């Protein structure tokens, strides 16, 4: 029942409550069970009056659809739909009476008008809401599948770009190593001087700059590669609704009708059959042996037809005629099918979203490591060449204005060891998380979301210095962006990562804001990783925010490989 209520609220403010399916259903109902009870249904003018009445009813629904599609605010849409449908449904029996009188057909007694108005209000509200829930769930299912599938496609492309990035990074390091070995080898040749040492130092500096620039550069992403998958045909899904749902719908729809058309004894007996039969249907369709064979929905619909037939027999016993006796059967079976269809589509939507969300979450974690290791290796290579290689050459040149061949050979040996360390940077294990993992995640999601992301310099330093902190921040950002895609894909989304100084030390804040008033605010799931990390979901004006704050452990210690660019001297 709660899922159906949530689906109804979403459909009410979603901007597509009235659809072509609503119009089609209104025609069928207007000419059958919702037609006014006249002494002679075959009399001349009755069908014409019904058709004109349906056209006027559809005109009211079309006006509701036009306004709800143009309204920007969710509350405005929901209010207009609720009021418009109620007024249109309430006016329907009045219009029918006027049309019947105009065509010379006796209208139902005026004493029945309040009951007919109440019947129309209840039945049309329930019917149109059920149709809207099914249509909205089907539309959401297609949109969610398309979006998340597109993200998965982009994640796969990001991993391929990561592999290409690592290959290019290895080539850069290997090229730098080959050049440095050539330069260091020159120190062992006759005629090497202090200028030779400076030339070698310039080589370390140039290689450090080049490798560091590669580490900072974004992947060569090119144009967005996310593709919308081919549309699949919608498959209607039935599922036994929450216990008591059909009974409540049937009683709500039929009680006003019964109060004007049946005796007190028949009403009491019908209520007993509806409540008892509904209880039996709910229990029998949920037996373990039935669920094990996957036949709960089929059993539910079949038993509902039996209960509807019994209700029709009770109505026939009151002498109302065949036409009136079939109304309980049609209404009960229709309520059962509608509730089962709504429950099935909503369950399918939730299951599909959960399945794809889990897959996307796993892909996000894999993508985080796509270029992280290569970037870390490049940063380490740049640091070694700058901090150790170039520094050793500068220090040697200061201390040895006229170096001897032995001193130059000893320097060459030391530099060979440094070059060996550069060559091995891809062999060691290192953290694959940092500020780059979050910026790469934002870059991937920005291909399918209207996303703006900001990672401040202080936050970037903290993330690079503390891999565990970066991993936690990544989890919160990933879940926030995934939720934005699931619930408000067309809305503006903002990702902000910031570090602030407080009396208790540095704190890192991760915040994902979705600017959509229709964004779902159901809270984080009990097994959500972001929830375990202390993130909280709250509403703000015009949207929702997923936010988490982390204490930055200890003092930050960041080593930068950025240096002023200088010219490279020619080989002496």
Image: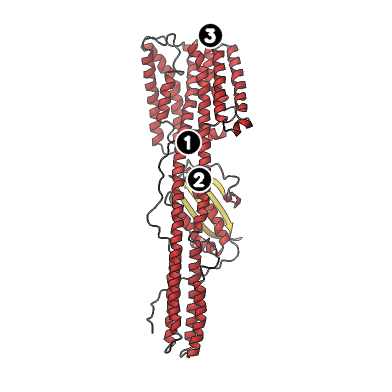
In 3D space, how far apart are the residues under numbered discs 1 and 3 (Cα atoms)? 42 Å
Which residue is tagged 1? 137
Which residue is tagged 2? 356
**Horizontal and vertical percent position of residue 393:** 48, 82
| Residue 186 drawn above or below residue 539 | below
**Mark 3 vs mark 2: which is more N-terminal?**
3
Residue farthest toward the front in the current orientation of the protein? 293
Circle 2 residues within 10 Å: few <14, some 14–19, many ≥20: some
**Mark 1 vs mark 3: which is more N-terminal?**
1
Closer to us: 226 or 476: 226
Which residue is tagged 3? 319
Q: Is residue 205 visible?
A: no
Q: Are marks 3 and 2 in contact (CB under 8 Å)?
A: no
| Residue 307 drawn above or below residue 497 | above
Q: Quadrant of the N terminus?
A: top right
Q: Which mark is residue 447?
A: none
**Horizontal and vertical percent position of residue 565:** 41, 74
Q: Are marks 1 and 3 in contact (CB under 8 Å)?
A: no
């Amino acid at each position: 029942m709660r899922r159906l209520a949530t689906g109804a609220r979403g459909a009410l403010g979603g901007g597509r409550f009235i659809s072509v399916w609503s119009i089609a259903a209104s025609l069928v109902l207007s000419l059958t069970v919702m037609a006014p009870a006249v002494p002679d249904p075959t009399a001349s003018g009755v069908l014409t009056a019904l058709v004109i009445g349906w056209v006027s009813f559809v005109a009211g629904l079309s006006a509701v659809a036009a306004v709800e599609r143009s309204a920007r605010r969710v509350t405005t849409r929901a209010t207009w739909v609720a009021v418009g449908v109620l007024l249109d449904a309430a006016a329907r029996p009045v219009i029918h009476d006027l049309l019947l009188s105009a065509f010379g057909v006796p209208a139902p007694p005026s004493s029945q008008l309040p009951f007919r108005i109440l019947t129309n209000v209840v039945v049309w509200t329930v019917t149109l809401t059920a149709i809207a829930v099914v249509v909205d769930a089907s539309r959401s299912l297609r949109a969610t599948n398309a979006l998340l599938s597109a993200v998965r496609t982009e994640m796969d492309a990001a991993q391929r770009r990561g592999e290409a990035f690592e290959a290019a990074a290895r080539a850069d390091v290997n090229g730098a190593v080959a050049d440095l070995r050539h330069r260091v080898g020159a120190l062992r040749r006759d005629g090497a001087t202090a200028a030779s040492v400076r030339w070698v130092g310039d080589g370390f500096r140039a290689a450090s700059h080049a490798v560091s620039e590669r580490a900072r550069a974004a992947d060569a992403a090119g144009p967005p590669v996310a593709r919308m998958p081919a549309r699949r045909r919608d498959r209607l899904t039935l599922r036994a609704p929450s216990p008591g749902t059909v009974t409540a719908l049937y009683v709500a729809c039929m009680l006003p009708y019964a109060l004007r058309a049946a005796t007190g004894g028949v009403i009491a007996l019908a209520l007993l059959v509806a409540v008892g039969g509904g209880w039996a249907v709910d229990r029998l369709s949920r037996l373990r042996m039935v669920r094990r064979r996957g036949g709960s929905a089929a059993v539910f619909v079949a038993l509902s037809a039996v209960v509807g037939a019994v209700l029709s027999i009770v109505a026939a016993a009151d002498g109302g005629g065949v036409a009136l006796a079939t109304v309980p059967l049609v209404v009960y079976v229709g309520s059962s099918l509608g509730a089962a269809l709504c429950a099935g589509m909503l369950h399918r939507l939730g299951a599909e979203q959960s399945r794809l969300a889990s897959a996307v979450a796993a892909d996000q974690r894999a993508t985080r490591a796509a270029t992280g290791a290569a970037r870390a290796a490049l940063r380490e290579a740049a640091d070694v060449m700058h901090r150790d290689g170039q520094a050793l050459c500068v220090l040697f040149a200061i201390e040895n204005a006229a170096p001897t061949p032995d001193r130059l050979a000893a320097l060459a040996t030391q530099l060979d060891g440094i070059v060996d360390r550069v060559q091995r940077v891809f062999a060691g294990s290192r953290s694959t998380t940092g500020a780059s993992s979050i910026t790469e995640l934002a870059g991937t999601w920005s291909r399918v979301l209207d996303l703006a992301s900001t990672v401040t310099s202080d936050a970037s330093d903290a993330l690079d210095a503390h891999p565990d902190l970066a991993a936690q921040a990544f989890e919160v950002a990933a879940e926030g962006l995934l939720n934005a895609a699931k619930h408000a894909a067309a809305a503006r989304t903002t990702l902000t990562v910031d570090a602030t100084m407080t009396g208790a030390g540095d704190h890192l804040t991760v915040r994902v804001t979705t600017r959509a008033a229709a964004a779902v605010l159901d809270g984080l799931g009990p097994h959500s990783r972001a929830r375990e990390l202390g993130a909280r979901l709250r509403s703000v004006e015009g949207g929702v925010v997923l936010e988490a704050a982390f204490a930055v452990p200890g003092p930050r210690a960041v080593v930068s490989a950025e240096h002023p660019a200088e010219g490279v001297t020619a080989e002496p």
